[in-house]
Amino acid sequence: MDIDGDIEDASRRVQVRFVTKLKPPFKAPTTSIALPSNLTRMGLSAVVNNLLQSGNDDWKPEPFDFLIDGELVRMSLEDFLLAKGISAEKTLEIEYIKAVAPRKEEDPSLHDDWVSAVDGSNPFIVTGCYDGLGRIWKAAGVCTHVLEGHNGAITSVGVVKSNNNENDTNMVVATGSKDRTVKLWKFDTELQEENLKLSSFRTLRGHTASVQTLASHPNGNMICSGSWDCRINLWQTESNEGDIVSIKKRKKGNKEEESQSEGEAVSTLVGHTQCVSSVVWPEYGTIYSASWDHSIRRWDVETGKDTINMYCGKVVNCIDIGGESSALIAGGCSDPTLRIWDPRKPGTLAPSFQFSSHTSWITACKWHKSSWFHLLSSSYDGKVMLWDLRTAWPLAIIDSHEDKVLCADWWKGDSVVSGGADSKLRISSEISIA
Amino acid sequence: MKKDGRRKVKDEDLKPVEKEDVVNEKDVLTDSEDGSIESPVVSDDDYGSFSEDDDSARNSDSESESASEQSEFSEDENDENPSNEGDLSDGVDDINQEYQSASEDSREVVDESDSSEDEVGPRNTIGDVPLEWYKEEEHIGYDVAGKKIKKKERQDKLDSFLARTDDSNSWRKITDEIEDEDVELTKEETKLIRRLLKGHAPHADFDPHAVRPYVDWFAWDGAKHPLSNAPEPKRRFIPSKWESKKVVKYIRAIRKGLITFDKPKEQPRFYNLWGDETSSNEKGHGLSYIPAPKPKLPGHEESYNPSLEYIPTQEEISAYQLMFEEDRPKFIPKRFTSLRGVPAYEKSVRETFDRCLDLYLCPRARKKRINIDPESLKPKLPSRKDLKPYPTTCYLEYKGHNGPVSSICTDPSGQHIASGEPVKHVAWNPLPELPILAVSMGQDVFLLDTGLEKEEQKMISDLLQVETSTTPDESESAVSVSWSQYDKYEGIRIKHFKKLTQRLPFKLHGLPVSSTFHPTRSIFFVSTKKNVRVYDLVKKKFIKKLEAGVREISSISIHPGGDNVIVGSKDGKLCWFDMDLSSKPYKILKSHPKDITNVAFHRNYPLFASCSDDCTAYIFHGMVYSDLNQNPLIVPLEILHGHTTTNGRGVLDCKFHPRQPWLFTAGADSVIKLFCH
């Protein structure tokens, strides 16, 4: 190999073989080669790129990340082997994956006020803003709908999944606001108009303080919301006339005749003693909630009881469920540490992972939908960080915001959308997560 | 004389040979010679021990007479009556046997010097050592050439007895222990021994009684007290009856075992050659003895004529002059050609004087000094780690103000904070149902309603309207005596007192600075610059006065329990009052170098804080126990830095988050900071 030529110290070499699960254009020959042990990730990446280039002439260099024994290499090979106690005698198998980092920064989507909530679970992006308007974006800078109706700042948004009909292009979006209401909005995703103003089809009242967070049932017929009144309310999304009292009235001022229904909470989960800062509804019967009373609880929806009550010692700002078999809890507290708990581990409340590269409170953390290892976190220090459970250092730091980042989410599996106090929605795309 | 001779003989033959032999020999000796037949053992009294004396005494008592009688009639009988004599000596021999070995050596010396003076020197060269030492050895000593002298094969008793009976001359044979050989006494020698035993002069030709001209050696002339020429009294020649009785008594006692003898004291076989002498000396002293440090032995350099390499050069000497007195070497070597040239010690006067001073000033009594670690005198405070959570680090800053933020307040749920820039003071209604914000500005108090929906807003406005007419909280115009009746609305704090005071029903001595309501009871605290006055609002009367004793009170805060008040002052002192304890402060904490601008208690956590113009805020742990006997525990926890000084002012206000252990600080640098745990 030509790489070997410039290394004078032949004694410190490691026999390695590169393997990958990537598709053929990325497949390097699996013959074992001797590499100097002081190579770092960059050097390894150059080696693999050279290998690939030797087999394919029109190869464009690509950054790679390297795994040894399921751990990402973040130092020189020698140090890594020493630290992990791996013998350098036998051939080392190094798996390479594409480096996870945003390669492209889209134009910011401008808002009038702080962008407090974002949802990217669908091909469109829903954002909530402190000016009381919700917006639906199709792409960077392309706003299709404006959700108008809240009196206060929107604190949370969520797409209510409606999978009852495959061809139904209508989507339902829920927004929670500081005016103590949750509103549901219906819109047609096929509609190609700019800044179409929408009004809500359903208003859910019942909270006595501002709504802080909401989450929808996996099949979309219920949503839950957490509020500053320490409660978690469960709501029906569709107004079943028979079941709940709904008031239908015509909006006189509006040209379009639109029915507006009001709903009341189906049930309330009481137990938190302070503001409920984050709720997640990952499965049919369980809701996870985080609160400023330093606890993370898991609720059984049927009985309304909390089955798990984890005490964290600090104010919990955000949680998300995901990772290995969708069981790990990632949470951001009122300190710069992103913690990941495994509730299946018996007898301990100590987090299994701690990532502390942020310098201020963590405002949002989200697991990647398809990967067990990747998650993102946003913080008041203005940074969005991408994490891999297999290394303690962030994979990438998105530092495009000028002020606090208030919300962040994955979008389309390969992009990160984030909104901040600089009133911009930032999209960092082309993140290749295998 | 008599004793000596007898002993010698006995030594020689008694010890080595068997008892029977001894008896025989003695018999022979005594018989052959017709002197007294007194057993040698009997009179052997100079072993120095009681028993010996007793024995001899007794024997001499009981037997000497008979023996002397016997001797008379057995004079001519030769070898006829050994048994008779053996009987006599037998009983005593038992006792004597054991002592013989002990006194062997001394006798041998005598023996040697006596018997072999004129002969060839002794073969054995071991000298005057106990023969016991060679008991276990194959040899008995060393000859002149240093070769070992082998012991002879010993005959057993029976053989020796038979040999003796066969040999008519056996009684002449004695064993020389040291040379390890049998010696046969010649006739002359036996005669000599007999004479000695009898106490006669050893040489037969010597006649002690020969008539010689009397030589009076004594010079009688001029003697003042002439010696008495009186003959010896008879009693000196008669054995004492009383003594013999006493001796018999002792012997009986010994036989019965009533008198036991001390065992010879065992000398320690080894001693610590290198042991510290001082430690052993110390034991003897009553006072604890401190040995003086050993002076260094003089070296070559202290010689009057040391080698040249010891002599410092001129530069070195001048360098010594520049040094401090203490650092300077004590002795600087100098060279003198002869000891004569050595001058007198120049420091002698000085050192004598110093010594006198030392003696004069030295303590006559030993002072017991108590060694106390100053650390141990500090009160034991719990570790800060155990008192978590408390605010430590600043994570959030609230920017937006342009000027100094004079006051902040959190809403009761902790969701919002209100901050005032030009206003004097802001305060939220602690009742969460009525989110009213009171703002004092200039001469007015404004009430703002925050975050209310329309219906409620209407309700509140109704309520406020009622208040405007009656409650004191509204404005100064309405404030009069009536406010005490409406103290259920005390949630809205009165913060502006400029004019209010004149209308108070109470007379204040001085301008009011700060005030607070009791958290549960209708008690009102007003602080003037000097002290804090406590009023009962229902009874409309003055309850007590808290004397802080500080220069100028700036702020006041009350513990949620209601019994403890902290007061911050402009000289940087923070006073903690226990209302039940006294009107004087329970603790005064001097922490800030500059004015304390505000103090605050936490509503739930046992925390309190003070902020100051020195741009810091101090967090304290202030635990109030429900047990009245236990004093509140105050532990300083943390100093929060971060604000910058502007126009000489630092942190203007601090407030705790109502539910979290967080502290908001408002600075003159127009920034509000949130410190979290």
Image: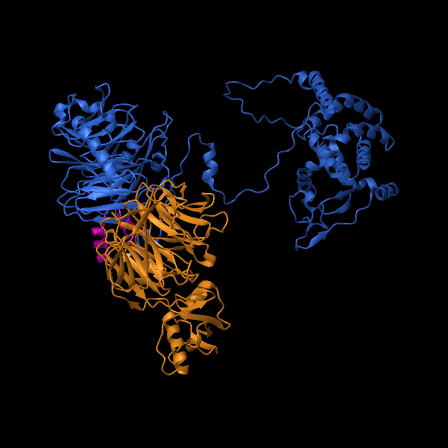
Chain colours: A orange, B blue
Q: Quadrant of residue B453?
A: top left
Asked if residue A212 is positioned above or below residue A410 in the image, the reply reads above
- The residue at 50%/72% (across/down) is A89
Asked if residue B408 is positioned above or below residue B303 in the image, the reply reads above
Q: Position of residue A50 (x, y in %)?
A: 38, 79
- The residue at 64%/43% (across/down) is B128
Q: Can you see residue B615?
A: no
Q: Which part of the image, by quadrant, shows the N terminus of chain B?
A: top right
Q: Looking at this view, is B476 or B470 the one in front?
A: B470
Q: Position of residue B254 (x, y in %)?
A: 72, 24
Q: Position of residue B163 (x, y in %)?
A: 86, 44
Q: Identify the magenta region.
A: B314-342
Q: Looking at this view, is B6 or B421 the one in front?
A: B421
Q: Is residue A337 magenta?
A: no
Q: Looking at this view, is B36 or A9 the one in front?
A: A9
Q: Can you see residue B143?
A: yes
Q: Is residue B327 magenta?
A: yes
Q: Which part of the image, by quadrant, shows the C terminus of chain B?
A: top left
Q: Quadrant of residue A187?
A: bottom left
Asked if residue A426 is positioned above or below residue B63 in the image, the reply reads below
- The residue at 42%/72% (across/down) is A37
